[in-house]
Image: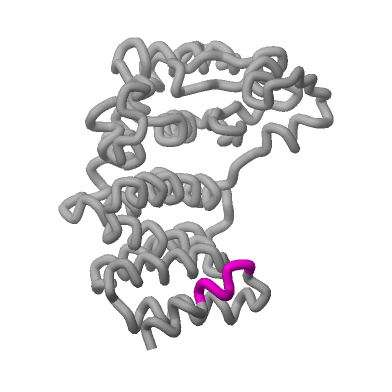
Amino acid sequence: MGDRTANIWQALQREVEQPEAQIDLAKAALYIAQVEYPELDPAAPLAQLDAMADVLGDRLPAQRYPLKVIQTINQYLFEELGFYGNQEAYYDPRNSFLNAVLERRTGIPLSLSLVYLALAKRIDFPMVGIGMPGHFIIRPRVAEMEVYVDPFHGGELLFAPDCEQRLSEVYRRPIQLQPEMLPQVLPEVTARQCLVRMLSNLKVIYLKNSQLAQALWTIDGLLVLRPDAPQERRDRGLVLYELERWPEAQASLEQYLHSLPQAEDRSVIEQLLQDMS
């Protein structure tokens, strides 16, 4: 890991160590993007978000009813600016980098949600990410109001029956949501968890494409966010092994076995370590 990348991970760590309400999720996402885009200055896309929020703020209704605010954001973001969910090239890595999403105006559920959340935060309309199986949506922090927004589908509004239908399609059986079930079935996602999802998505894409150097830095980022995750330590060692960086691979795999003595794949890892010795 070079000094530049190490500095990026240090900046990311400082950001996510703050109290949840103070974490700038957009800035943290741009730190991650800097690894892939060396010339990126986070100040530029952050200024772009500020400018977008200024335009949006001038269009907000005098009475800031939640549904009216959401309607205003949707009209500006999806109809006027033309942001859309990239269904045709879903696994293009650029869909996960916030700077590229802002430039190309397309992304995946998580990255489009980050844009939406960043704008909502800037106009003092608190919203939170929601983890739906195989998907990512958001909702306003409004007491006794269970409405969800799907940025990947143009800001579509989802109410409890809509969520039941989507979950029924995922699980292939009827799902009925009782109010007390919502926090478990549709949990709020913290800023750190959002970033873990982002890096995990990129990791899967890079590994599938055999882009091992890129996969390695995503794992390094995941270890910044989850330093006690044994699986990431193992995967780091395996990628380093494939890159023929034997001493580093050996160190990571030994750390993995030390942290998880009863690992199911212990015999496989021990064989790899023996091959490198």
Q: Quadrant of residue 147?
A: top right
Residue 205 located left or right of residue 68: left
Judging depth in this view, the residue of 18 and 4 nearest the camera is 4
The image shows residue 149 at horizontal and vertical percentages of 55, 21
**Quadrant location of the C terminus in the rendered image:** bottom left
Q: Residue at x 67, y 74 (%)?
A: 262
Furthest-left residue in this view: 39
The image shows residue 139 at horizontal and vertical percentages of 60, 27
The image shows residue 88 at horizontal and vertical percentages of 32, 22
Q: Is residue 16 above or below residue 60?
A: below
Q: Residue at x 32, y 42 (%)?
A: 97
Chain part drawn in magenta: 264-269
Residue 267 magenta-highlighted: yes
Residue 196 magenta-highlighted: no
Q: Quadrant of residue 157?
A: top right
Give the image's coloring scheme: one colour
**Quadrant location of the N terminus in the rendered image:** bottom left
Q: Residue at x 36, y 65 (%)?
A: 239
Is most of the magenta stretch helix, strand or loop?
helix
Judging depth in this view, the residue of 157 and 255 nearest the camera is 255
The image shows residue 92 at horizontal and vertical percentages of 30, 36
Marks counted in the figure total 0
Q: Is residue 66 above or below residue 214?
A: above
Judging depth in this view, the residue of 275 and 90 nearest the camera is 275
Q: Quadrant of residue 67?
A: top right
